[in-house]
Amino acid sequence: MSYKSSAAVQMDMSLSDFKLMAQRLRSVKVFNDFAEHVEKTSGNKDLQLEQRLNALRDRVTSTNSKSRWLEPLAIVSKQDAQDFGESTKVDKAASLVGYSLMATAGSAEEAQSQIRLQSNYVLDASLKEILLARHESALVRQKAAAVSTAASNTNHLNNIHILEKRLEQLRRISLAYPTVNRSESRQVISLDKSGERYMPLASQMAAVETEIISIREAISNSERSLLHSQFEGEMLSAQGKLEVAAKSGKDLLTALSADIAARIDLAKEEHQKALFLGYANEIAGLKARYIDLPRFITEPELPMSPTRSPKLITFLFALLGLIVGLASQFRAQLKLFIAGLIRDEDSVLAAPAKVEKSA
């Protein structure tokens, strides 16, 4: 006989995200980091807590496909689909609202304590995995942006080189043919442009110089972007070390928030502050979403009545079947024994009559 407790944790996601997160939550390393954090924050050695962590570790990291400790909580249930039909169709990208958790124990209080510990693990480990995925995505984006900006800058420099050579050629032509510089002299023919007529040389040189100025402005913006990317790369590299050291999602979020706040205070350029403020806003959003707001759809419940284990029921039915079988065999044997006694009695009664006839 056992008691079952359950809880529902809010975390909107797609079904594919749930599948991915569920696999990560089964990781031994992920759970061991959480267990180390819990034991460290609990202070004194707690044997009961250690037993609960060991039981949860076995349940979470089990490779048994029948282990149902974590289930997706759908926006639309099967009953909803049957009742409302087509009106229940929702976007596949947001088809889940969170996790449904279950745990069993020998007492109601222990079942509730286990499900609360299990809920804390799911919430904290999920937050940490989200932060790690966010950092990895930001690092890839930063490296790609740095490479793209450097390539664009190189292309701009090459274009300036080409335009400066063209400007030099136009100036040489202007000196060689001074009459062409008049505004009415518009009969400069381009043989490689299918005979299209150019603007006056002075206008061409002005256009080239204007284009060079625009490209230099683009190069200046690219250099700022490269510097921006450099600051971002340094920050992400430092935060990567924080992620390695952190054992819990909540501690990691706190450490990232403190790191960004310190960088904002030390930033000298406005574009640096804008970069760090963007990250600070993102971290604040994660904190509000996963820590400040209520995370439970239903709190870990205290079961009021026990549930019978399927294994126990199977055992009892097997035992009952065995008893019935043995009783049936005993009854058959008893019948044979009684029948044997009756035959023996008949034989004894028949024996004196045979003796008298023979006499």
Image (tube, rainbow, N blue to C red):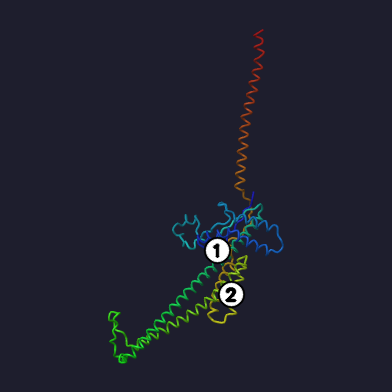
Q: Secondary structure at mark 1?
A: strand
Vertical placement of residue 311 versus 302, above or below: above
Q: Position of residue 35 (x, y in %)?
A: 64, 61
- Identify the residue position indicated by label 2 in the image: 260
Q: Residue furthest top?
A: 359
Q: Position of residue 315 (x, y in %)?
A: 61, 43
Q: Position of residue 215 (x, y in %)?
A: 43, 82
Q: Tell me which numbered mark, 2 or 1, is placed earlier along the sequence.
A: 1
Vertical placement of residue 36 versus 182, above or below: above
Q: Write down the quadrant of residue 123 in the picture.
A: bottom right
Tell me the tag on residue 11. Answer: 1
Please tell me which residue is depicted at 64% across the width and 23% down the height of the picture: 340
Answer with left or right where residue 93 lies relative to residue 196.
Answer: right
Under mark 1, the amino acid is Met
| Image quarter (top left, top right, bottom left or bottom right) of the C terminus | top right
Count residues near mark 1 (Cα–Cα under 10 Å), then give few for <14, some for 14-19, many for 20+: some
Vertical placement of residue 272 versus 336, above or below: below
Circles 2, 1 touching at the beta carbon (< 8 Å): no
Q: How many marks?
A: 2
Under mark 2, the amino acid is Ile
Q: Residue furthest right?
A: 44
Question: In the image, which is nearer the foreground, mark 2 or mark 1?
Answer: 2
Q: Position of residue 21 (x, y in %)?
A: 55, 61
Q: Write down the quadrant of residue 326 in the picture.
A: top right
Q: Secondary structure at mark 2?
A: helix
Count residues near mark 2 (Cα–Cα under 10 Å), then give few for <14, some for 14-19, many for 20+: many
Please tell me which residue is depicted at 29% across the width and 87% down the height of the picture: 186
Please tell me which residue is depicted at 58% across the width and 59% down the height of the picture: 27
Vertical placement of residue 232 versus 68, above or below: below
Q: How far separated are the C-alphas under marks 2 and 1?
A: 26 Å
Towards the viewer: 135 or 257: 135
